[in-house]
Amino acid sequence: MQLGDKESPGSWRKIFKNLKRLGLDTNSVQFGTMEGLPGLGRVFIEWFTMAKVQRCQMRVACSVLAKVPKKLKKGCC
């Protein structure tokens, strides 16, 4: 665990730097799924240059459903 601001690119850089210090091979990471935090996506790409990134599909669905009128939600789900 590490304290930090979830929106801050600097916090994510510290976390990834610490993971590398603990032995993570940044070239071995192939895929990252994330919620869409702006700082995280940008820094993930900096540190894990070989990895592909995808937004968490559950979060995408929740974001869409939040905008659907209540009477249409059942059919949309």
Image: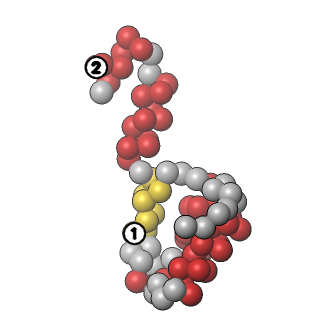
> What's under tag 2, amino acid-wise?
Gly
Q: Is residue 41 visible?
A: yes
- Within 10 angstroms of label 1, few (less than 14), some, or many (20 or more) residues? few
Is 25 drawn above or below residue 61 in the view shown? below
Tell me which corner region of the image, top left, top right, bottom left or bottom right, holds residue 47.
bottom right
Q: Image point 55% across, 67% down: which residue? A: 1
The residue that label 1 is drawn on is 31
* Label 1, label 2: how far apart the Cα atoms are: 33 Å
Task: Tell how many labels.
Answer: 2
Please provide percent x and percent y for residue 7. Answer: 66, 55
Q: Nearer the viewer, residue 56 or 5?
A: 5
Q: Is residue 26 above or below residue 67?
A: below
x then y, percent, for residue 17:
61, 80
* Mark linked to residue 75: 2
Residue type at the position of mark 1:
Phe
Relative to residue 36, is residue 70 drawn left or right? left
Q: Residue at x 32, y 24 (%)?
A: 76
Residue 11 locus on image (x, y percent): 67, 66
Q: Quadrant of residue 16?
A: bottom right
Quadrant (top left, top right, bottom left, bottom right) of the C terminus: top left
Residue drawn at (45%, 53%) of the image: 55
**Which residue is at 60% across, 67% downward?**
2
Figure check: 44 above or below 37: below
Of residue 3 and residue 49, the one placed in the foreground of this image is: 3
Asked if residue 43 can be seen in this view, the reply is no
Q: Secondary structure at mark 1?
A: strand
Q: Which mark is residue 71?
A: none
C-beta proximity under 8 Å, tags 1 and 2:
no
Name the foreground residue: 56 vs 49.
56
Left or right, 11 with respect to 21, comes to right
Which element is circle 2 on?
helix
